[in-house]
Amino acid sequence: MIVYAVPSAGIFGSIKVAHQFVDLLQAEGVAACIATPDGKASGWFRSQAPVVARAWALDHLGDGDAIMFSLPHDHAELRRSGLPLFFHCQGTDPLIDPVLRDENVAVLTCWQQAYDYVLAAGGRAPTDVGISIAPAFHHRGEMKDPHVATHMPRRGREIAEQLAEACPDLHLVPIDGSDEAEVAQMMRRAGVYLATAEGEWFGLPALEAMAAGCVVFSVPVLGGMEFLEDGINCVVGDVEHLERELATLFAPARAAHWQSLRHAAIATGLRYRREAQAVKVAAFAATLPERMRRPLGLPRA
Amino acid sequence: MPERIAIVIPSRGMNALLAVAIDHVQLALEQVADRASGTIIVCDNATDPPYARADLPAIDVLLRYDEHRSFSEACNAGVAASACDLVLLLNNDVLLHRHALDEMLDLVHEPLMGIVGTRLLFPDGTIQHCGVVFGEHGPFHDRARRPTTIVPRAPRYLQCVTGAAQLVRRDVWEQLGGLCEDYPFGYEDVDLCLRARQLGYRVACAQRVDSIHFESQTPGRVERDVPSRRVFLERWHGRWSIDAEELPYGA
């Protein structure tokens, strides 16, 4: 069995990605569950992943079982378990470097730049297991309000407000504090998403917004550049550049341009369907030893 | 070698319905006779007057409680009384479709599978059970009271299926210690599924055919539901993954 240890049940993209991965592992016939510090489940997105307390998991795992994690801070504690470890690399923060250098940790990556980073910093080729976005985000042809701009105020609120000033007809709608279904509804209805987290390691909301048919205006990021293609499916640039572009958002002469970006963004989102990731997860699952795929045995004496 | 299925039917009163339910079990067993054999065990849960063995000629074992026990206790006693590879918990108001067991047996042999349910309908043709899903406030029957035609016939993989017709691998049953007996009546099936999934087992619901479930026919059943829900929430609240949108109250 594989237990995916997460640091909390909070509203962080990495928590959701962990649950999605466990759901896909189960579908591929690999026994897997989520372990949170207190055994509480996340309630802000859809998943079927079983949840246990981390201490319970560490007490019950035995021969053949393994632990997966994505937060580098967990490395030391989990290493003491003596069990095989998988590091699910979702970002490229140098804090992960010691994990990458640990030869006892197998590394999985979900983004191209994470793959490249592991190759460079860890000196080894990781296993690409991909990433996907929840079906709720994919645009279904709903009527959009071009004046609504969704954004995540947790990082870059000032930038969002500055950008909104460049386009006074734009109405800012924050998405923090909402559950996944509500965020998906907001994005599918919105015309624009402002990605304002400078130096973002891991920008799932921008990809979700693209799938939802938003025109994404993004500051340069560290994670997400594999799907953010400036001028093709979004706009990427410094704040001044974004301001200039947003000032033309409702200019009739540019309507076709924005529509083109929107359509390309939807197409980009389709590349990250759950079914597409399932193919990669199946390939990974096929490499696991049979005893690691099995359900948990009885508790150790 | 054919697999041995213990069909455990806890029952209180409802003599005529029980007899018809047993007839349906026999029909379903005939369809899978090439790969499974069944032992039908009825746990008489304080019926007054007690069931007479002669009135239930098709069953193999009749157990009897003189005082009313929980659903869990009755089921656990029934399973303990049998040597089997698979356990089928069955309510006395479920009329199994003759092909229901066939699909359930297919599913229970999929990798990691621990527990399998099946689609159940109310007599009016609407869905009683096609899988249990979880919202913020707890588990509920997905698509209940909706037409059976709106749910696809492919198997569904879920967090839980109802114990009204629940096929459980015996080794999984033993590993879990059977049903938790803290529940007066209700939610012990949900508890079993959640615990099985925590160990890595999967839960699925067969959808190919429609069986009938009259639901909550046993006297006193509904009154025991509230304390059961309390036990369930004390144990599990906040510990299930949310996989469905809850309908507004009254919807």
Image (tube, grey):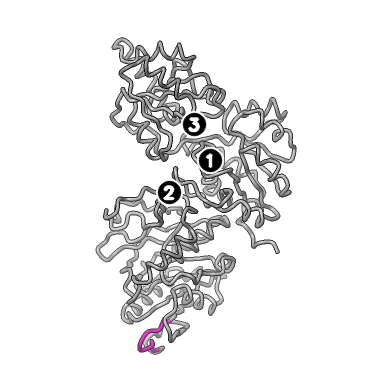
Q: Position of residue B110 (x, y in %)?
A: 53, 56
**Same chain assignment for discs 1 and 2:** no
Residue at numbered disc 1? A15
Question: Crowding near pointer 1: few (<14 within 10 Å), some, many (20+)?
Answer: many
Q: Are marks 3 and 1 in contact (CB under 8 Å)?
A: no
Question: Crowding near pointer 2: few (<14 within 10 Å), some, many (20+)?
Answer: many
Residue at (62% x, 57% y) in the render: A296
Amino acid type assigned to the residue bearing label 2 in the image: Asp
- Magenta residues, start to end: B44-52
Front in this rendered view, residue A104 or A197: A197
Q: Position of residue B59 (x, y in %)?
A: 43, 82
Q: Is residue B190 left or right of residue A39?
A: left
Disc 3 is placed on an element classified as helix
Label 1, label 2: how many angstroms apart (C-alpha)?
15 Å
Judge whether A62 appears above or below B88 on screen: above
Which mark is drawn over residue A204? 3
Secondary structure, magenta segment, majority class = loop
**Does B49 appear in magenta?**
yes
Residue at (36% x, 60% y) in the render: B129
Amino acid type assigned to the residue bearing label 3 in the image: Leu
Label 3, label 1: how many angstroms apart (C-alpha)?
12 Å
Residue at numbered disc 2? B243
To which chain does the residue with label 1 belong? A
Residue at the left extreme?
A: B124
Front in this rendered view, residue A70 or A10: A10
Amino acid type assigned to the residue bearing label 1 in the image: Ile
